[in-house]
Image (cartoon, grey):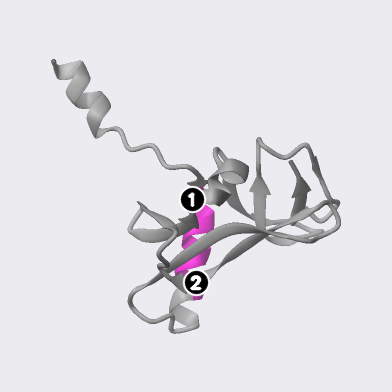
Amino acid sequence: MKKIKEMAETVVHPIKITATALTQLKRIMQEQNIPAGHGLRVGVKGGGCSGFSYILGFDKKKEADQEFEIDGMSVFMEKAHSLYLLGMEIDWVEGLNNRGFSFNNPNANDTCGCGTSFSA
């Protein structure tokens, strides 16, 4: 019985956001004075050099959205986009050659050199 209760308490999110990415997202929310009721929108759109581009921004929840919470941050994602994003990790990278969010997507068959578009 205890094992079942532990499993029920385990929350599984369709995507993962690393601690460093969450820190940056919360900083951006504060700096840009994002209004209450807005959350992080994660999604895909057609375009980019590999076929799809990632969507990452702040928005209000829409009717077709799936909503979940990661470390106090509301995350919105259209249910149809989960096919392309399930299991993806969003990270924040600071290096000599690039600085910004990176997307590690196990569903991507191919990615572009900049890492912001993919094909599935």
Image quarter (top left, top right, bottom left or bottom right) of the N terminus: top left
Left or right: 37 as drawn, with respect to 13: left
- Residue 106 vs 63, above or below: the answer is above
Tell me the tag on residue 79.
1
Instruction: Based on the picture, tell me whether residue 42 belongs to the magenta stretch.
Output: no
- Residue 1 vs 73, above or below: the answer is above
Residue at the image point whose x is 47% and y is 42% from the top: 14
Tell me the tag on residue 40.
none
* Residues drawn in magenta: 17-28
SS type, badge 2: strand
Q: Quadrant of residue 117?
A: bottom right
Labels 1 and 2: the sequence-earlier one = 2
Residue at the image point whose x is 82% and y is 59% from the top: 97
The 10 Å Cα crowd at callout 2, few under 14, some 14 to 19, many 20 or more, is many
Identity of the amino acid at label 1? Lys
Identity of the amino acid at label 2? Phe
Instruction: Based on the picture, tell me whether residue 27 belongs to the magenta stretch.
Output: yes
Label 1, label 2: how far apart the Cα atoms are: 17 Å
Image quarter (top left, top right, bottom left or bottom right) of the C terminus: top right
Dot in front, 1 or 2: 1
Q: Quadrant of residue 38?
A: bottom left
The 10 Å Cα crowd at callout 1, few under 14, some 14 to 19, many 20 or more, is few
Coordinates of residue 86 in the picture (x, y in percent): 55, 40
* Magenta segment, prevailing SS (helix, strand or loop): helix
Coordinates of residue 96 in the picture (x, y in percent): 79, 58
What is the tally of numbered marks visible in this picture? 2
Left or right: 109 as drawn, with respect to 57: right
Q: Which residue is mark 2?
A: 58
Coordinates of residue 52 in the picture (x, y in percent): 74, 54
